[in-house]
Amino acid sequence: MAPEPPGPRDPREQPSHFMWGGRFRSQPAASFDALNRSLPVDYRLWPYDIRASKAWVRALAKAGILSSDEENRLIGGLDRVAARLAEGAGEGAADEDVHTLVERLLYEEVGELAGKLHTGRSRNDQVATDLRLWALDAAAAIDQELKLLGLALLKRAREGIDWLLPGYTHGQRAQPVRWGFVLAAHAWPLVRDRKRLAECARRIAELPLGSGALAGSGIEVDRVLLKETLGFKSISPNALDATGNRDFVAELLFVVALATTHVSRLAGELMTYSTAEFGFIRLADEFSTGSSLMPQKRNPDVLELARAKAARTLGDLVGLLSALKGLPAGYSKDLQEDKAFLFDAVDTLLVTLPAVRGAVETMVPVPERMSAALDRAMLATDLADELVRRGVPFREAHRLVGLLVREAEERGVDLVAVPQDRAAAIHPLMPQILGRLGSFEDSVERRATAGGSSRAAVEAQLESLQHELAAPSPPLP
Amino acid sequence: MAPEPPGPRDPREQPSHFMWGGRFRSQPAASFDALNRSLPVDYRLWPYDIRASKAWVRALAKAGILSSDEENRLIGGLDRVAARLAEGAGEGAADEDVHTLVERLLYEEVGELAGKLHTGRSRNDQVATDLRLWALDAAAAIDQELKLLGLALLKRAREGIDWLLPGYTHGQRAQPVRWGFVLAAHAWPLVRDRKRLAECARRIAELPLGSGALAGSGIEVDRVLLKETLGFKSISPNALDATGNRDFVAELLFVVALATTHVSRLAGELMTYSTAEFGFIRLADEFSTGSSLMPQKRNPDVLELARAKAARTLGDLVGLLSALKGLPAGYSKDLQEDKAFLFDAVDTLLVTLPAVRGAVETMVPVPERMSAALDRAMLATDLADELVRRGVPFREAHRLVGLLVREAEERGVDLVAVPQDRAAAIHPLMPQILGRLGSFEDSVERRATAGGSSRAAVEAQLESLQHELAAPSPPLP
Amino acid sequence: MAPEPPGPRDPREQPSHFMWGGRFRSQPAASFDALNRSLPVDYRLWPYDIRASKAWVRALAKAGILSSDEENRLIGGLDRVAARLAEGAGEGAADEDVHTLVERLLYEEVGELAGKLHTGRSRNDQVATDLRLWALDAAAAIDQELKLLGLALLKRAREGIDWLLPGYTHGQRAQPVRWGFVLAAHAWPLVRDRKRLAECARRIAELPLGSGALAGSGIEVDRVLLKETLGFKSISPNALDATGNRDFVAELLFVVALATTHVSRLAGELMTYSTAEFGFIRLADEFSTGSSLMPQKRNPDVLELARAKAARTLGDLVGLLSALKGLPAGYSKDLQEDKAFLFDAVDTLLVTLPAVRGAVETMVPVPERMSAALDRAMLATDLADELVRRGVPFREAHRLVGLLVREAEERGVDLVAVPQDRAAAIHPLMPQILGRLGSFEDSVERRATAGGSSRAAVEAQLESLQHELAAPSPPLP
Amino acid sequence: MAPEPPGPRDPREQPSHFMWGGRFRSQPAASFDALNRSLPVDYRLWPYDIRASKAWVRALAKAGILSSDEENRLIGGLDRVAARLAEGAGEGAADEDVHTLVERLLYEEVGELAGKLHTGRSRNDQVATDLRLWALDAAAAIDQELKLLGLALLKRAREGIDWLLPGYTHGQRAQPVRWGFVLAAHAWPLVRDRKRLAECARRIAELPLGSGALAGSGIEVDRVLLKETLGFKSISPNALDATGNRDFVAELLFVVALATTHVSRLAGELMTYSTAEFGFIRLADEFSTGSSLMPQKRNPDVLELARAKAARTLGDLVGLLSALKGLPAGYSKDLQEDKAFLFDAVDTLLVTLPAVRGAVETMVPVPERMSAALDRAMLATDLADELVRRGVPFREAHRLVGLLVREAEERGVDLVAVPQDRAAAIHPLMPQILGRLGSFEDSVERRATAGGSSRAAVEAQLESLQHELAAPSPPLP
């Protein structure tokens, strides 16, 4: 066999696989290419690929691999490639992946010199770097949206601090609480999400570039410089680990899945309150949908979709973790799937948060329906507490009030309407205590421990919530 | 307030929400629309939406809602809409979903008459019908690809019936087997997948159309006629169940996830065999990739991706099942997510199967590496069986051969090279039996039970496999 | 080194690992044993292990490996082992797994002859056989419980055929329906579950025994005889596939996960109806719980737990499918995890179904609350249908009624209370149609298509449901 | 009806439901009890329930609810209950849950006074407190085991710093690396796991006690005192959120699932190396198993099980997240499932880590098999880098070396054995460069960037790894 003649070759002959085609006699089969090509998924990484490539050019120059002139021409070329990509030059391209696309366009800009860019670098450390850069931006965007939803809940909570409604456990009326207290209960999880996100971001910000394919770069590049240039916080300590490490994807997926779960809980609760039977809130027209068949419908699609999205981000998390199971250290192609999971989950959360925020901002609370749902049986704990104050052990007090509740229920009357002699038969002090049971407001005010539903306690927690939310997003990275 | 004037209104004023906008004062907010619009996902349902709509027109005409002329104009209009969509008329459309898109285009074709199409129908029964029609086609396509992969394995199995290699359990050499036997072990799961698929398809083929939004259509349409026209097998028995039932999606997702898992097992095993250390097969150039950094690499990306795809389809299954949890009967918007999961999983399997088939069809087995991997310790079971034939209880024979193996291992020699006196010390018959141990071929031939690795048994199973695979795909539905 | 003296050895010296200890110098480390021992999980398989072992004894005898006397002594020994295990002989045993336990006890019963039992058999085909036998019984038990829950729903549905309540979509009132229709919507999924279960059971009933460790048994046992003795339907066609095949576990797990999801949907809907705000049902005392703190609480824990159990069985399914990903054909120890997943899921469903059935059987419907929840806006579709009958295209009729709904909503009045001139301004026929709108009963009766909510349609579907449910459980296998 | 007489009642009459039975006429049905009773799962929380109860007694005394004498009697009683439970008093108890068990035993110790313990407390804040205390101990135990596995890997890495073997990507030989470098790549993920765990622990350490059932305690207890007494770091800010918040369970489950995934990757890689074909390591006898049928087998069950456990902990994570989806704020009984998931996952990891550590500590590396697996094609990158140093752009150099590799492969010879004229035809400098290619050691030393495989770089990273691992476990909390 005659070897192909040496010398430069036009990479466009092998548009998608010129990066590695030299050792093969034939091009990839179409069926394989359909499975293998990742450009449709990883295309969105191009700004990060450019950024990381520019940093790499600087590092190669410092390492003496590129002359100053070559350095400048490559930087200029990469900038022009970026400009072209921003104008859509990559749309519909047939390249294998975003790295190949960028390198091919760079050939068009600077000719053969483009072939020097990939010196000492592998797609293994390159894609890990690109994806970490993307993930840092994604984390910042999510953080901002979590903050905005939290602030929207806080605003509505402040407005509703004096509206009482039943608090529910097990889906059943339990004790009276403040509307502001209920809304705040859905804001605190977002505060936790932001903390998890910030910690996750610190781990994302570890530079893999300079790890080569698995064993470190064959060129002595200055990884500290690379780190500083790209804004990372630390340097990966083991090249084999660095190229096969997808912890940062798993962790971000988890944070996203849990945050979406929090939104699903808020959405589920608001759905209940927006039914005709509860009627505590009414969604605004611009966050409601109708039915194609039933002209009267006002549907809370926004809340249902938000609820379902928690399942979707969970599926993405499962996909990634299951894909990682049992893989050896270092790069395996299985890792390519990471992006499909991460992009889908992040996109999902980022389209869900603003919509739910809008629904929260515009929903119309109906305080008179809230107060109408309060019933005197919800004061049963207060009754028992009062017996406790007269010396009855709580467990016994609970039982006695339980008997009173049963009596009232079987008579179909309010607690306070149980005949005095029946109440007294349960406990001699009962009629007197019943007479002084007080209002729902009194009941709420009795829960004055930190985190409780008294007005002062709620005001304090809203203050503290404001403080947590107003804090600037953690500097990322 | 002055009500809007009655009379026909141009639906194009409200391109995306004219189906239900009448009762609202304002259009959906942009953030909500971004979450709510499903057209980018459900667009591919349009051929099924047209088919189902044409059947519905026939049914409305039979029910006296449409005149014969109206019927013909609507059918003609729908055909023209289909033609336009086939030419790309729907790309980039801003409609809420595929049903709205089709109805809007129909207005363009037949004017106000289009407004009669949705009589007695809801998007709830409509989308369930569309998706079932799509799923039946998907099942047929998957069935065909499973069959083709099975046949490819069968062909390679036939070719390799006489090549012996180690069979492995726990990843360790266990007993000699035939290459054809190993490949066939990966074909049988596909036969089972096809059976599951056929049974699933029977359940997909249940007509929901005519269920209205939840309580049955207000128009007395002939559901038997609808069923026949659309090629379904049965009619849904409860309208509320029919509109909220996504069992068919869950079941198809499961069949897909399990089939992808089977492919991942084949891929994982072939990966092992394609390492330099095993060397039993070599992937063809057109199913190999190289490295961007290391010029010598020949990577089995096709197998790694196939392995990872099992994680992806599992994620899709999780998403759907988790989305369904706790929903009431009937339609909830959460169900809209079903399509994202189903389309992703089906697309994934349909891009994976042909690529893996190609890899199987073109891989180069290396029988000499296979036979070189056989070692005499793999005949230990035969040795024990021989002691059994001389009357030693198996458990004791096993222990004795274990001692011999240990002796050989500690001496670093082959089983048959253990000195005679040491062998005799373990059991007086041992030297004699060792002397007659026979070849690997003898060992394989001793496993002649149905399903075993003897030549006749393998030939019989390949015959039977051929029969199963050659069977026409089950008529769907 | 001096080999250990040949000759029989007391297996009790190595209680847990005498099956394979011969070739090793040392016993398993404690930390490894803690991970490896499966007896606490697989102990419950012992009746199946005995059954399969007895069949194996018969087959060995027929193959000439055992004399008739040995056969009888082994059968007798196994029966005595079974009797001892039934009395608790295995509790707290230190054996590696159930197979080792049974074999050890058999030594105690019949001495050295016990060592002949494992001839030609491997734990790989043995455990697959045991687990399939167990799974068939599990499938039968689940089928029975699904049937009973279906019948309970049917009974309550019949009783409630004449009670009208709002049917809901998107959690919002949609159209009036019958209580019996709603309950039946939750029974039909169980009918489908039973069909899936029956089909799954057919695939479970494939005999793996006789496959040896991976390559077929070295003894020519009669696998057809084994199949008949054990009640299987077919014989596994490939020994390598048979020993590594866990499709039957995956499939049963899926059927269980989906059935639990169905129960979660029923539970979720009943929870909503049991709130004070809806009040359509009241759980019986014996299916309610109270609160440790709030004396008045009546909590639907049974329904909440049923809802959560769908998440649990989903987790089990995920565990199994993820464990299978990428494994080679044949036995890998990873497969040992299958039992933990399957047992947990089956146990979960079998404890959930009777509890939910009890809740359904004893709940108290409150028809007056149901009818009180009907409002006239739910007749909007009827209004539009009526306009259609007067020639207005449906889409336009929908819009007109939408305007009427908006008018009523903004006035805070019932649809029929919109002033005649305002109604007429929307459409001249509107006042007249409003006047003849009819009752909720009329509306329900208008949905008379198959599967609809009219009385006749519901009666027909309950008849058909009765027929489906009363059918004997499919003969398994 | 006559109410039951007031006055103390023997709680043993209603052993399992005396906490809330007062208001009901009948006891829970058996089928419901079977679903509802959580004692078999939550029993292990008893030490934490006692601890939290003692802190609660102090707080009630400070709040004036208990006299000093009552306080002392209750503390003494709880200590005696703890002593009895430590001796097995709770085994097989029929109580509803661990809280009921403890309270019932307390009645036995101190009589009616026990009824005062539950004043102002709910099982909702109580169980959240108990489980957080348990989780903190679990996190500490996991941290310790992660550290020990890391140290074991480090020790083996140090020992193997001079053994070269192929580094793999895509499962294929890539570049030569050091054995110590490979082992270290599996230790770094454990360092990250410990960091995640420490951060997670900080969030676990937030006190829910004092939140009551949902709205705060009706008794003004000093929550700061409670926090200090129990060793928490902060106080939950919203009672409704605090009682329904299971973020800490989700987060710990995630950390566990990811850590188990890391272990599965280590296990998967060691499995490959322990095959006869690779032969780089040999598991010690005490971490190997045999086969019941094949006397020669040495199976790496420990590694297979470790691999599969990643699927199991993933299933647990899925279960919890799916259970949380869509729940309202506050306590729902669905949350009871959290413990089954968390306990299973933590137990799984804690049984896996010591076994894998043992396997790592005792495995026998086979350096001669490692070095035998190195082949000259693995120096292809060095060859290309050398061309780069002579001015050839890397992409072109890569292609040229690819041609050389192809030539060698097609001739079936080593790279350096390609005839000079063929090499020169590819590039004139090729023969010269081939002549100076150097050893595998040279190649490894060329990768001297931080994290690379040169000796100095590996030494530096092992130093740093030692530093990370030796750090004391983060103080929890």
Image (cartoon, coloured by chain):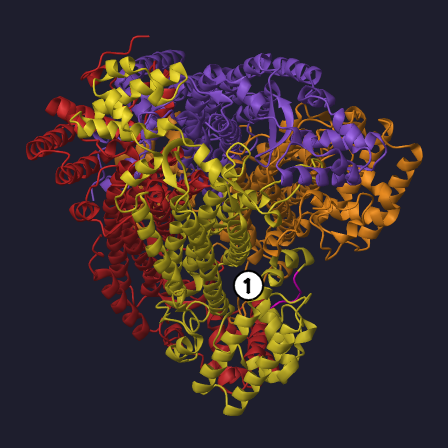
Chain colours: A yellow, B orange, C purple, D red
Q: In the shown orientation, is residue B202 left or right of residue A277?
A: right
Q: Which residue is mark 1?
A: B298
Q: In the shown orientation, is residue B439 left or right of residue A12?
A: left
Percent coordinates x, y for residue C443 in the rendering: 70, 23
Residue D216 seen in render: no
Above or below B247: residue B106: below
Q: Quadrant of residue D211?
A: top left
Quadrant placement of the N terminus of chain C: top left
Percent coordinates x, y for residue D309 in the rendering: 38, 43
Percent coordinates x, y for residue D115 in the rendering: 18, 26
Instruction: Find the magenta span and give its range.
Output: A23-28
- Chain for numbered disc 1: B
Q: Quadrant of residue D406?
A: bottom right
The single residue placed furthest to the top in the displayed view is D1
* Three-letter amino acid code of the residue under disc 1: Arg
Q: How many marks can you see?
A: 1
> Could you say whether the residue bearing mark 1 is in a helix, strand or loop?
loop
**Along the viewing direction, whichever of C148 and C117 lies nearer the viewer:** C148
Above or below C11: residue D287: below
Residue A314: say if magenta: no
Q: In the shown orientation, is residue C252 left or right of residue C42?
A: right
Q: Residue at x 80, y 34 (%)?
A: B56
Majority secondary structure of magenta residues: loop
Label 1 crowd (10 A; few <14 / some 14-19 / many >=20): many
Above or below C195: residue B201: below
**Along the viewing direction, whichever of A153 and A301 lies nearer the viewer:** A153
Quadrant placement of the C terminus of chain C: top right
